[in-house]
Image (cartoon, coloured by chain):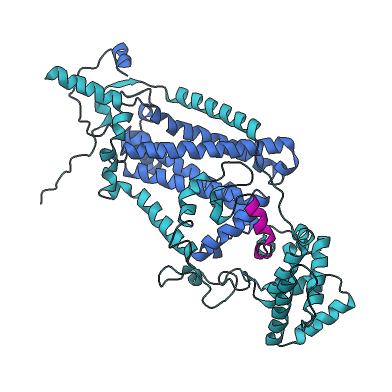
Amino acid sequence: MSGEGAAGGGWTGALRRRATRALPPDKLLPDAQPAYMASWIYVFGVLTLAALMIVLVSGGVLALKGPAWWHVSGTGRYVNSLHLWSVELFMFFMVVHLWGKFFMAAWRGRRALTWVTGVVCFLVAIGTAFTGYLVQQNFDSQWIAGQAKDGLNSVGIGAFFNVLDFGQMLMWHILLLPFALGALTAWHVLLVRLRGIVPPIDATTPPATPPAPAATREAAG
Amino acid sequence: MKRRHRRPSAPDPAAFPTRTYDLLKEFTIASAVVALLTVGLAAVFSSPDVKPVTLASWARADGTDFTATAVTELGGTSTTATYGPPYNHTPDAAQKIGPVSLQNAAGVRIRVDTANDFVLRPLRQAPEPPAVTAALTTWTAAAPARQRAWTSAYSDALAKANGAAPARGDFGPVPVLVARLRELARAGALDGQLQAQGTFYQTDYTRPLLFLSDGSHLESLARAQHLKGDQWGMMNETGNYPGQAWLWLYTFWYQIEPFKSSGNADALIWAVMALLSLGLMLVPFIPGVRSLPRWTRVHRLIWRTYYREQAVERGRRA
């Protein structure tokens, strides 16, 4: 209500104010970045996101048509191939991104949670890919399930997470794990936007200077 | 008490000079590049799809192995029958990490009785020739020790015969039972029986997969596809495809001692990988490890433009 002033709006208003204070639009969708952000290694984060999008879209088409479709249809086989290769690219980009961030010590400056969510994303992605291999319904699935059960059973996980149960693995692969991966990725990206790009190791705060003209700024980048 | 303010370990990025950057444009270009790469790779290399093994194809291709496995399932000596949790209670079968057995702690939650589930029930559910009915009656009436003696003697005779007809011996009703089971398997009936388990809809393949895994047929096919553990198979898939290359470290431990020859290898390697994963997650908090990036100096390469400009700036000031 207008009578409640700037602090009004109840829980919703409080959440909105907190969100816009932490991540104002120009920080959420920036059109400028620190000039030190000038290396090919930065590209791998966005490449990982792009590959994830293709993984989700190709997986969505496979889900629409059902798990047996790709075995009996040429188009289905091609969509399955898109899914396989986008996963391979996704994992490759993510590993390069992870190593890049390690060598940048990107957890500095209150960014530890960004690192932790990134590593958890990596581990959840491994689980998602693994369940994907289990639900292919071919020889690979049979063999991988037969071998993986021993590892999981040896630590008690197999009693609850049965890799020989196709139905259970399909649900994990197309619902639970993608949901977890999507939520973690969103959290990770928001943390990146919130804390900004980590400055170079041993960099010190530059002395305050009057803002340079736009052309000069671009030339410096 | 005065609160101590720690110096931040990195300055605020907002204090640095900036350059123009288009987030949406970068994402669009990246998406287009990845989409093109994916479309190209999928068109050129496709994806592997080797047909699954069925109980029918196994019994037809390697009847000797099928029969030998069926005898061990009936006698309770197969890998699954002696597995322990989560399938059954078998003393000392569970793996341990030191004194702790998480496998035992989780308990038996997917109960599998190999003699009944894999052999006797399918035989009873199928139309029974009189000889099979008589064999089932004899088997059920016999004491467990007698049953074990029959299956053990028949297993030995099969091994000695090496694929030929075994020598005569006191095998009780075992040859009749497993011969009928092989007939059912060859006809394709056993696949349906093990999957259906009395229901119409079915998505759980635990029992047929366990039966298949107990034989050596599946294993020999896997070896031909370089999928065995000693072939780093965990990170491979059928054909010449990259597979799960990211599992290289997990499969690496299986290749070296003390894991390679340990009866608790699976549990120990899980523990090692859990610890390493936790370590990777907590790198920012581990002294020494968190300083590795500074010591390796790879960051000098990543931010070479920044460091070069800083050096020029320092030189100018000097």
Residue appearing at x 33%, y 30% in the figure: B302
Question: Residue A164 location, x and y as percent?
Answer: 62, 59
* Number of numbered discs visible in the structure rendering: 0
Chain B takes which shade in the image? cyan
Q: Nearer the viewer, residue A131 or A100?
A: A100
Residue B218 counted in the magenta span: yes
Q: Please, is residue B250 above or below residue B48 in the view?
A: below
Question: Residue B298 location, x and y as percent?
Answer: 31, 34
Residue appearing at x 31%, y 29% in the figure: B301
Question: Residue B88 location, x and y as percent?
Answer: 59, 74
Q: Range of the magenta residues?
A: B210-225
Chain in blue in the render: A
- Side of A75 where B241 appears, left or right: left
Q: Nearer the viewer, residue B148 or B303?
A: B148
- Can you see residue A55? yes
Give the image quarter of residue A108.
Answer: top left
Q: Main secondary structure of the magenta part?
A: helix
Q: Nearer the viewer, residue A150 or B259?
A: B259
| The C terminus of chain B lies in quadrant | top left
- Side of B87 where B309 appears, left or right: left
Q: Residue furthest right?
A: B130
Question: Residue A153 location, x and y as percent?
Answer: 53, 64
Residue A7 counted in the magenta span: no
Residue appearing at x 14%, y 46% in the figure: B4
- Can you see residue B198? no
Q: Nearer the viewer, residue B85 or B214?
A: B214
- Side of A76 where A22 appears, left or right: left
